[in-house]
Amino acid sequence: MAEPLWFLAKRSAAAAMICITFTDIVGNFATIQGNSMQPTLQQGHKDFISLLKGDVVFYEKISAPAYKYCRGDVVVLSFFCRSPTDPDQLMVKRLIAMQGDWVNVPGSHEIHQIPKGRCWVEGDNGNLSLDSRNFGPIPLGLVKGRVTIKVWPPHRIGRVERVLPEGQVMFTDMHSCVITRSCLECE
């Protein structure tokens, strides 16, 4: 009796270590809560039944150490940028501009140049989004990963496309997509 239990314990421990390593290095899943990314991402709610109606996304973390992000990517922001209304909720926003770019802030006559090592993020639903329009450019180090796929609900499974609002960003270097990659690599 003890031998099968020991075998099960070893297998369970190995599976747990593999899962933890995967979620720490490769990527993780996030449930969308809130309306700031509509229509790209739909919100779920706290109760289980409503949660099944909202989008669940996979975000990859491999891009994070080298800041391999492009304008238009949907990104997950780290625990330093947790939602002010619910600290357990990660913030998911669209990366609009990179260091050196000039951004025309929607709904205002303001134009900002993004400082070195920072980026500008916004929700797709600007009326309901708490983002760089409220708190300015954020450090690239706070970007935890790039949302790549919607995995739930089944009728919405698919890639999360890279989209950049027209006329909002003025690039200082048309060939610079991020610190380390050219725009050709982002395509």
Image (cartoon, grey):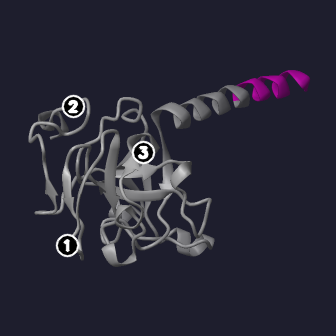
Q: Contact, CB < 8 Å: mark 2 with mark 3? A: no
Residue 185 drawn in magenta: no
Which callout, 3 or 1, points to the residue nearer the camera? Answer: 1
Q: Contact, CB < 8 Å: mark 1 with mark 2? A: no
Between discs 1 and 2, the one toward the N terminus: 1
Residue marked by disc 2: 181
- Decide if residue 102 is on the left or right side of residue 11: left
In what quadrant of the picture does the C terminus appear? top left
Residue at left offset 55%, top offset 73% = 45
Residue marked by disc 3: 143
Residue 144 lies, with reference to residue 33, above or below; the image says: above
- Which stretch appears magenta? 1-11
Q: Amino acid at mark 3?
A: Val
Disc 1 crowd rating (10 Å Cα; few below 14, some 14-19, many 20+) is few
Instruction: Locate residue 134, reporting x and y percent.
Output: 40, 67
Q: Amino acid at mark 1?
A: His
Q: Secondary structure at mark 2?
A: loop
Q: How much space separates mark 3 and mark 1, taking CA atoms?
A: 27 Å
* Most frequent secondary structure within the magenta stretch: helix
Q: Which mark is residue 109?
A: 1
Q: Secondary structure at mark 3?
A: strand
- Decide if residue 68 is on the left or right side of residue 3: left
Residue at left offset 40%, top offset 35% = 64
- Pick the front one: 123 or 52: 123
Between discs 3 and 1, the one toward the N terminus: 1
Disc 2 crowd rating (10 Å Cα; few below 14, some 14-19, many 20+) is some
